Amino acid sequence: MAQQTPTKVPVKNPASSGSVLFSFAPWIVFGVVASPSTWEYAALAALIAAVVLSGQDLLHGKFRILDAVGIVFFAVLSVLGLALNRGQLLWVETYAQVISSGVVAVVALGSLLVDPFTAQYARESTPREMWDSPVFLHINRVLTAAWGTVFALITVSTWSAVRFPSQDDWLNWVIPVALLVWVVRFTARYPETYKTRAVGRAPQESTVRP
């Protein structure tokens, strides 16, 4: 008698755009507020947001790499703003947004080598037995790659704004906002789209055993 073992598909979304956005909120706050004259305030505001949104979870051992990196990054920037004079911090004033976006891109893409950062959120709403599912892993790799790529593109865009100040509005605002809107929508849609395809392929991919 043949028995089929179907492809495991998570019941719930592997990652919700809302939960991921909570971790990105401090970085977005910094990107919106930071400018040559306000980056210190932006760093402090982002640090407060990071602590409020994720500090309690970290204290209770719920580690998310983007949250931890955000608290450390904005704390360092805040300390630098207090400890050093304006001349010593000219490079920060000029490249604050570039640096912050670059850090996010490195963290997101780097996490693909160990544990895709979106999986840390997805596990909170997905049964444990699904965590090693090929579908769960694939979706979170794709979502993590999407966020990392978007912030890499934002890094290039904000760096270009420094080099071409006449295009500041497009490079510092229009393009980054459009990329963020796209990746949020992609995060909301892609899991269900891929799971639907995976369910459709399950009979062909199943293993037949006696």
Image: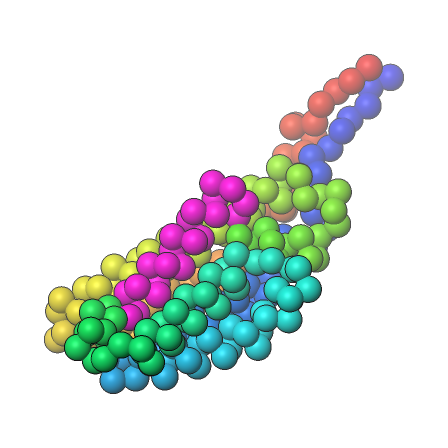
Q: Is residue 205 magenta?
A: no
Where, quadrant-wise, is the C terminus in this rendering?
top right
Position of residue 30 measured from the top left corner of the image (x, y, whole percent): 38, 75
Exactly how many numbered labels are in the figure?
0
Residue 148 as seen in the image, left or right of residue 65: left
Residue drawn 37% across and 80% down?
A: 42
Q: Residue furthest top?
A: 210
**Picture layout, residue 103 above or below residue 30:** above
Residue 41 can be seen, yes or no: yes
Residue drawn 23% across and 80% down?
A: 85
Residue 109 as seen in the image, left or right of residue 15: left
**Picture layout, residue 36 above or below residue 112:** below
Q: Residue furthest front?
A: 83
Q: Which residues are magenta?
A: 96-116
Q: Nearer the viewer, residue 68 or 85?
A: 85
The rendered magenta stretch, by its main secondary structure, is classed as helix
Q: Nearer the viewer, residue 174 or 66?
A: 66
Residue drawn 67% across and 53% down?
A: 123
Position of residue 165 measured from the top left corner of the image (x, y, whole percent): 14, 74
Q: Is residue 109 magenta?
A: yes
**Picture layout, residue 201 above or below residue 55:** above
Quarter of the figure with residue 189: bottom right
Residue 47 as seen in the image, left or right of residue 127: left
Where, quadrant-wise, is the N terminus in this rendering?
top right
